[in-house]
Image (tube, grey):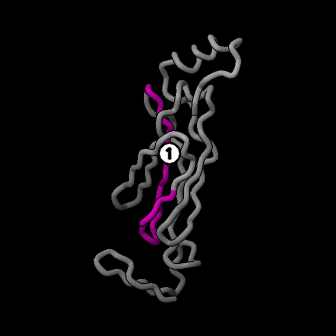
Amino acid sequence: MDCKPDSRLFSTLFLVLCSYNFLVPSVAVGNFSAVQVTMTTIMLSWEPVPCLSSNGDITSYTLTAASLYDPITISIGIGIQNYTLENLIPGTEYQISVTAINVNGTGPVAMVTNTTDLAPGSHGKLDHCLIYYIDGILNACTC
């Protein structure tokens, strides 16, 4: 988000608050949500940190999706307010976080938890489905 005032009247005050306050963002992104699209895909969305809380221009966001397996960490440029995590493991709980970053560092974390479905329509529960994994890869699912 660009931290430039619309009026010259507030330019000096705004410059002090937004550009010369050597602090990280003081609040997390807003309305962070995760919606499962498929068994292996989760769509994320958020609202940017308000300018007066950003303590300077936001330069990027960091997304992290952690499970029992290796965490996924992604750097996302400014202006993007949604991202789709792909190739996730069915039936796995993910702790997903996003943080805003400015030139001074990383702000507070916004976090959600989402569990990918084991089978279409199972909502994270097995419910009499047979799932076949070969070398850790989902090969077949019959319900």
The residue depicted at 52 percent of the width and 88 percent of the height is 143
Mark 1, Cα crowd under 10 Å, few <14 / some 14-19 / many 20+, is many
Q: Nearer the viewer, residue 135 or 57?
A: 57
Considering the numbered disc 1 on the image, is that residue within a helix, a strand or a loop?
A: strand
Q: Position of residue 119 (x, y in %)?
A: 51, 79
Q: Which residues are magenta?
A: 84-103
Number of on-image labels:
1
**Residue 36 sits above or below residue 18 on the image:** below
Residue 76 position in % (x across, y down): 46, 45
Task: Classify 34 as above or below 99.
Answer: below
Q: Quadrant of residue 3?
A: top right
Examine the image and state in which quarter residue 79 appears.
top right
Please identify the dominant SS of the magenta region.
Answer: strand
Q: Position of residue 31 (x, y in %)?
A: 64, 47
Q: Is residue 134 toward the left or the right of residue 59 in the image?
A: left
Q: In the drawing, does residue 126 fall left or right of residue 121?
A: left
Q: Residue at x 56, y 65 (%)?
A: 36
* Residue 83 belongs to the span the image colors magenta: no
Q: Position of residue 68 (x, y in %)?
A: 37, 61
Is residue 95 on the magenta stretch? yes
Q: Is residue 53 above or below residue 35?
A: above
Viewport quadrant of the N terminus: top right
Q: Amino acid at mark 1?
A: Val
At 61% across and 23% down in the image, what residue appears?
4
Name the residue carrying label 1.
Answer: 98
- Which residue occupies 52% across, 87% down? 128
Check the image and report above or below for 107 versus 133. Answer: above
